[in-house]
Amino acid sequence: MSIIQSIILGIVQGVGEFLPISSSAHLVLVPYLFGWEESGLAFDVALHFGTLLAVLAIFFKDWWNLFVGAVRKVTKKEDSTENKMFWYLVIATIPGALVGFILDDVIENVFRKQIWLIALALAVMGVLIYVGDKWASKHYKKETTFDKISLKQAFIVGCSQALAVIPGFSRSGTTILTGRLMGISKEAVTKFTFLLSVPIIFGATILKVGDLTFSIEVVVGVLTSFVVGVLSIKFLLSYIKKHDFSVFAFYRVILALIVFVKLIFF
């Protein structure tokens, strides 16, 4: 892998991790479409670590407050929104973490090898995101804010995260869609999704760090995904204040069609 390729893949990861378009699908499809050698799951996880740093950079204060709230509950018996949300995020992480751990070999050797499956997942989730977001906007007159998210909502969002083991479904895409279908506001479910990414990416990094060979390409890719990840988070948080998720749904379907054309005719 060249430095240029690692930069491009770092950009792909930084954009795809936070926008609901599936970074894992793009990390497989970009090498496929350009005829590059596949980077492998370990390198992809390294790029995910870069985006983990991006989330921590943007939401460090939020995570610190959540942690402090949990500690105060234990030490001083103080109830708080921060304590509640800390444990909700912990509980929401468990389903996706278990599925990812159990299906680790299947993800590496089956899901990532099936280009048609990745394209299909992109298209299907694209349609679902479009329809689901439109339905939620019309159906719910009063949407749930971040501090009002319930344990049931948090757990179901966490369960939906498990679908992201198949590249193309998208961790952020599935969690945002699920949250919207349960009446959580765009801003609230996006923030919850970003916070939820921290433990799951951290766990995946720990799981794969032993398989990774450190090199200048890896370092460049991680730094690139970090910088682009910060920009992507800021972009999406600003974008959803005035727009819905339609543009991402259209993009997913168009990319899936391009991949199917290449599969069938080339």
Image (cartoon, rainbow, N blue to C red):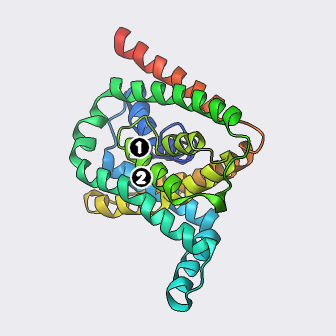
Answer above or below: position of 149 versus 244. below
Q: Of 55 and 144, which appears nearest the observer?
A: 144
Q: Mark 1 and 2 residues: CB-CB less than 8 Å, in contact? A: yes
The location of residue 109, given as percent across then percent down, is: 22, 39
Q: Which element carries disc 1, helix, strand or loop?
A: loop
Answer above or below: position of 258 versus 210. above
Q: Amino acid at mark 2?
A: Glu
**Label at residue 43:** none
Q: Which element carries disc 2, helix, strand or loop?
A: helix
Answer above or below: position of 12 versus 138. below
Please give the count of numbered marks on the rendered protein.
2
Task: Characterize the local packing of mark 2: few (<14), some (14-19) or many (20 or more) Cα atoms within 10 angstroms.
Answer: some
Answer above or below: position of 95 versus 128. below
Q: Amino acid at mark 1?
A: Ser
Q: Which residue is mark 2?
A: 217
Q: Of 54 and 91, which appears nearest the observer?
A: 91
Q: Quadrant of residue 129?
A: top right
Q: Of 3 and 99, which appears nearest the observer?
A: 99
Image quarter of the C terminus: top left
Q: Of 104 and 158, which appears nearest the observer?
A: 158
Q: Which residue is mark 1?
A: 2
Residue displayed at 38% across by 37% down: 167
User: Please, which residue is most extreme toward the bottom here?
Assistant: 76
Of pointers 1 and 2, the one earlier in the residue sequence:
1
The location of residue 216, given as percent across then percent down, is: 41, 57
